[in-house]
Image (cartoon, rainbow, N blue to C red):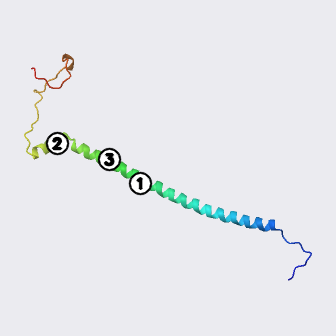
């Protein structure tokens, strides 16, 4: 129970090394938990970004589809008729082909015949 006086005691360096190693192990555990949580957080952010990108792709496709519907000439013609506009289609015989090389001016309209 009692120690003998001639028995050697462990030195202070051994206690210091045990305490230092325990601190390093504890710090490693804390850092491991921190990095693992950060990894999970980053993975969730990446997944959320992927979902947003996919939603943007769907929105782009939907917008393109609506634009195609709005720019459809038959739909435009029908809307003009429904609105009671006085606009009418131009017959093909009335359309004139103009050669831009014959004109020196670059204006669209001219007062001269």
Q: Position of residue 10 (x, y in %)?
A: 84, 70
Q: Is residue 54 left or right of residue 67?
A: right
Toward which corner of the image does residue 105 lie, by quadrant?
top left
* Secondary structure found at label 3: helix
Mark 1 highlights which residue? 51
Task: Work out whether 107 lies above or below 28.
Answer: above
Q: Position of residue 50 (x, y in %)?
A: 43, 52
Crowdedness near tag 3: few (<14), some (14–19) or many (≥20) residues, C-alpha within 10 Å: few
Task: Tell me if label 2 and label 1 are in contact, CB under 8 Å.
Answer: no
Q: Is residue 23 left or right of residue 88?
A: right
What residue is rendered at 65% in x and 63% in y?
Answer: 27
- Cα separation, mark 2 vs mark 1, equals 35 Å
- Cα separation, mark 3 vs mark 2, equals 21 Å
Quarter of the image with the N terminus in it = bottom right
Mark 2 highlights which residue? 76
Task: Tell me if label 3 and label 2 are in contact, CB under 8 Å.
Answer: no
Task: Work out whether 102 lies above or below 28.
Answer: above
What residue is rendered at 29% in x and 47% in y?
Answer: 63
What residue is rendered at 58% in x and 61% in y?
Answer: 34
* Secondary structure found at label 1: helix
Toward which corner of the image does residue 72 lie, by quadrant?
top left
Mark 3 highlights which residue? 61
Q: Position of residue 79 (x, y in %)?
A: 14, 45
Q: Position of residue 70 (x, y in %)?
A: 21, 44
């Amino acid at each position: 129970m009692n120690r003998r006086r001639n028995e050697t005691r462990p030195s202070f360096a051994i206690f210091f090394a045990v305490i230092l190693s325990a601190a390093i192990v504890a710090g490693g555990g804390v850092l491991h938990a921190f990095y693992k949580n950060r990894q999970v957080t980053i993975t969730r952010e990446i997944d959320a970004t992927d979902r947003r990108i996919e939603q943007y792709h769907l929105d782009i496709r939907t917008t393109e589809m609506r634009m195609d519907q709005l720019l459809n000439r038959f739909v435009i013609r029908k809307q003009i008729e429904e609105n009671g506009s006085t606009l009418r289609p131009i017959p093909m015989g009335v359309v004139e082909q103009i050669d831009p090389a014959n004109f020196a001016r670059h204006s669209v309209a001219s007062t001269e015949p």
